[in-house]
Amino acid sequence: MFTQRRNLIFLFFGIIGLLFIGKLFFLQVVDDTYEKAADNNAIRKIIQIPFRGEVYDRFGKLIVYNTPVYDLYMIPLKAVVKDTNHFCQVFRVTREYFIKTTQRARAYSRVKPSLFLKHLSKEDFASVQDAMVDFPGFFFETNAFRTYQSRSFSNALGYVAEISPTALVDQKDDYYRQGDYVGISGIESFYEETLRGQRGVKYRMVNSNGVEKGDYKNGSLNINPISGNNLYTSIDLEIQEYADSLMQHKVGSVVAIEPSTGEILAMVSAPSYDASLLTGNNFSNYYQQLALDPMKPLLNRPPSAYYRPGSTFKLVQALVGQQLGFIGPGTVYSHAGAPVKCHVHGPVDLRGAIRVSCNPYFYHAFRKMIYDNTSGDTYERSATGLQRWADLVANFGFGRKLGVDLGNEKKGILPNVDYYNAVYKGEKSWKFSNIYSISIGEGEIVVSPLKMANLAAIIANRGWYIPPHVVKGVGLAKSIDPFYKTPVKVGVEAKYFNVVIDGMQDAVANGTVGPDGKIPDILMVGKTGTSQNQKGKDHSIFIAFAPRDNPKIAIAVFVENAGFGGSAAAPIASLVVEKYLKRKVDRKAVETKFLNMNYLPNAYGGIARKKLAIDSTKK
């Protein structure tokens, strides 16, 4: 009995011993979890940032590329600096910068890498390598900053900057880290996920002093970074730079579009900025200067600035009026009974009204569109006619976004029944006599230069457009969103465009366009506009396309505080059209005149960005 009990005890302890031996064998031989944990104490995980995609113009000219630089990161939990003065001397930073940056890093995370110093050159990187052994917890990662071949495309291109704390918290895919760079505006922002590429990671073995000893496991766990996709834009860089030069000493926009494709050939916002100064350590100071500049150089005016279209909107009125059946080529109006002023001339038909930009003609035409074939009191008739009109005008892109690939497009204002009910605080509180100013492109209607360039493209195409876009190809396949290949019809039959184009041709040949706006050997058709401005001189506007048959370019030019549309905007547009179609300019005297023309003295008060108020004096 005693022997049996002793054997059971030995058996029990034997089994327990075998279990311990087995577990020990598993942990030391089979399971490498603890081995990896130990290795991690001597392995540095290095994030490899991919090169951002480059940007090219329509002919393959490089606009933006990357220059390699080195960023210094720190992990607060592992960072050791025994001699702060020595550290600051090595990296050429102040003690104040050191304290402030390390505190910010600890506040962000004690275990995650934080950016300490950015954009060291190859030379600076090489000069500090020997000292890195004295500063465990600090390490370098290769990065790149954007380098620009031209400064004339800055507003549409946009810029990159360090990701904000808010964006870092709000990101959906947990891709970015503190100190990373992202596209902030323009196509840099719109195509961020395409441009940024995919991160890589490298595992390096280090000794107790932090000195690297080679790849961990011969690099089998490393993941190579994948560079971002290149963008192939539709911009003609030569024309972009030429248009930009014409807009020096001026405030405004130039937008040129290829009508058959919707590709933007040039997009100038004036005044602009030098994107190369929004890189590296220059960023903060230069950005502050730009942000405080009352002329708003950071604003990309073509898709974002607000203007009344002035007389250029008469082209829309002419097309919509014909489509609705209220006017035709033979419709004649005089000045009688119209509250709007005009030049001295007799009764005109539709073509003549466009040629001389007759205000009373389009007042009468608009009144007919509003009141004819309606019933009820004056409010009910006004509301029915206005909504009918607004529904068709909206097809031209007014009061809505065109979808340009820039990310900062504004809708503008197309006043309809709901709009006026809100403004006048209820129904039956307004009627045609309160809104007639929109008949000539004034009052409450607000547009952007991009929309007016697109209007020129619509007329050039006789009733359709492709959404305007800056990028025509992405990556090696040069693919593009089908949205930017799909024609959009505006709902006006092609036959109604002929008389409008005839009037535009007359306007250039012997109408509202002066001698400086005529191109002797190119048949350009266009329409001038003068946008009312409550501060300073009125804004000069001109839209056009050329040549008349098989158009190759549609353009809109806005010059703030420059007065009549035919005296400033039209000549600038004609020079850009001539340069694009002929690749040279023969009218050297006109070119020199507008290269040197300065419209800045009154421009500070004339930037039309604020929400326009209703003129309560209109009855």
Image (cartoon, helix red, strand yellow):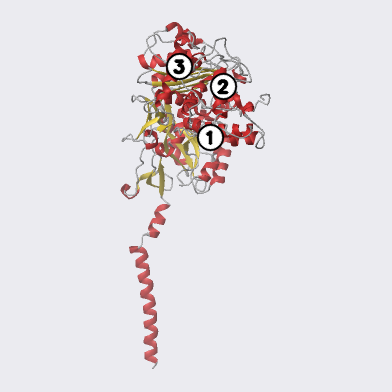
Mark 2 or mark 1, which is nearer the start of the sequence? Answer: 1
Cα distance in 3D space between marks 3 and 1: 68 Å
- Placement of the C terminus among the 4 image quadrants: top right
Residue closest to the far right: 617
Tell me what residue is drawn at x 35 percent, y 70 percent.
Answer: 22
Q: What is the C-alpha distance between the residues marked 1 and 2?
A: 76 Å
Judged left or right of residue 165, residue 476 is left
Discs 3/2, front: 2
- Please provide percent x and percent y for residue 350: 48, 18
Q: Amino acid at mark 3?
A: Met
Q: Nearer the viewer, residue 254 or 474?
A: 254
Q: Please tell me which residue is depicted at 41% across the width and 56% down the height of the picture.
A: 37
- Are dots 1 and 2 in contact, CB under 8 Å? no
* Precedes in sequence: disc 3 or disc 2: 2
What is the C-alpha distance between the residues marked 3 and 2?
Answer: 20 Å
Q: Position of residue 231 (x, y in %)?
A: 37, 32
Q: Using the image, tell me which numbered label, if any, was put on residue 504.
A: 3
Type of amino acid at the residue the image marks with label 1 = Cys
Q: Please give the residue where the numbered disc 1 appears in the rendered image.
A: 88
Task: Residue 194: name its quadrant.
Answer: top left
Q: Residues within 10 Å of mark 2 (few under 14, many from 20)?
A: many
Q: Amino acid at mark 2?
A: His
Q: Secondary structure at mark 1?
A: helix
